[in-house]
Amino acid sequence: MKTKLQVGLNNLLQGAIDLRPGQRVLLVQENPKFGWYDSQLPKALREFAIDQLEAVVEVLEVEEPSNSAHPQLEQMLKQQHWDWIIFLARIGDQDRFEVNHHGPGKLMTYTRTLEQLQSGLGTVPHAAMVALKTAVNDIFDNAENIEITCPFGTQLQGKAPSKMGQTAKDVSVVRFPAAVSQPIPASTFSGRVAFRHGLAPTGSKVYSPACLSLPEGIVAVIEQGVISSFEGNDKDIGAVQDHYRQVAEQFNIEPWIVDSWHLGLHPATAFPLDPQVDLDRWSNTMFTSPRYLHFHTCGAYPPGEICGMVEDPTVTLDGAVLWKDGHLMATNFKALAKVAHYWPELNLL
């Protein structure tokens, strides 16, 4: 009988990318001193890929992300003999919205520790999560009117874009787990959005300070996909405006654009600490949780540079409730009920 670790590793390497004997893998691992990825996961992954799947694996350790290319990684990529680049490192997120994708396959891994890989986050079959993601995307694709609310003051309405799959940029790499819906363009959305806990980077670029702590939250007033004002205490409003302007000036981008948003899909997502302990890690972990709706702002491109999180969202499509208080209402849609029936592992979540 397989251990949970073996199930997780098999799910990652065969379920997500169908790694085969003889294929060459470049494993890009982030130095564990930064606290995002542990030292045990890359070792276990490498051993499993070599011993069990007979793949050829080389390892490159990298530092934390920067806004310039990694010279050694670029040099190794020029060798052009890789079948897969597996990222156990945040730099794998920096090119995830690239449309014209060439070269080896890329796998970005969000299970950052052995513990996470052995949990439901890593062991629920990848195919099950892809089926769930596809069903949710199709439901949005066939909707007309979307309404988003939350217990903290969110009240946002907009139109679902026709042919969403052709107009919204989804990621060009394989993500493990497949735990978010496709980004939905926000250009038709207007209303109020309550961002909880603070603002954090999207992972696209690096800037300092990376986060803005807002223990009381902040409300953004949005008009047709553009932030027109903020509501909250005067000190927080001033800090938020300064934060947006600073990031926008650094990268010469439009500060008030709301590019898109998506929902988390994986109930096994967990962050054991208070968000204020590390807003960056909290945001870039919990974006895969159904309890949060994740907004891409500051920059007219996905994923923008500043993200805001709506907590316990309710999402209604043409009068039918798809999400209620941070929970996916699978029984309200036949397509979701069908996926849940076919993949009983999803019900365990």
Image (cartoon, rainbow, N blue to C red):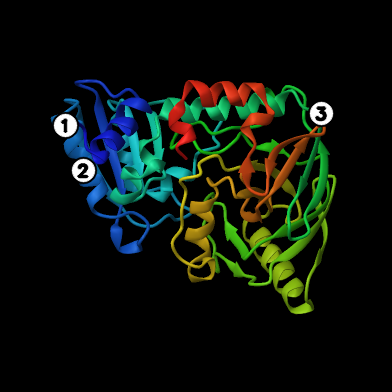
Which of discs 2 and 1 lies nearer the camera? The answer is: 2
Looking at the image, which is closer to me, 238 or 346? 346
Q: Which mark is residue 144?
A: 3
Q: How far from the left and from the top, in percent, is residue 326? A: 63, 48
Left or right: 312 as drawn, with respect to 273:
right
Pointer 3 local density, CA inside 10 Å: few below 14, some 14–19, many at least 20? few
Q: CA distance from mark 1 to mark 3?
A: 49 Å
Earlier along the polypeptide chain: callout 3 or callout 2? 2
Amino acid type indicated by mark 3: Glu
Q: How far from the left and from the top, in percent, is residue 18? A: 32, 22
Q: Quick one: SS at disc 1? A: helix
- Residue sitting at 16 percent across and 31 percent down? 50
Amino acid type indicated by mark 1: Ile
Earlier along the polypeptide chain: callout 1 or callout 3? 1
- Residue sitting at 70 percent across and 29 percent down? 140
Q: Which mark is residue 245?
A: none
Assess whether mark 3 and mark 1 are in contact (beta carbons under 8 angstroms).
no
**Image quadrant occupied by the N terminus:** top left
Q: Quick one: SS at disc 2? A: helix
Q: Label 2 belongs to which residue?
A: 44
Q: Quick one: SS at disc 3? A: loop
Q: CA distance from mark 2 to mark 1?
A: 10 Å
- Picture layout, residue 206 above or below residue 265: below
- Residue sitting at 58 percent across and 60 percent down? 200
**Residue 265, quarter of the rendered image:** top right
Q: How far from the left and from the top, in percent, is residue 168? A: 67, 31
Earlier along the polypeptide chain: callout 2 or callout 1? 2
Amino acid type indicated by mark 2: Ala
Q: How far from the left and from the top, in percent, is residue 260? A: 69, 42
Q: Label 1 belongs to which residue?
A: 50
Assess whether mark 1 and mark 2 are in contact (beta carbons under 8 angstroms).
no
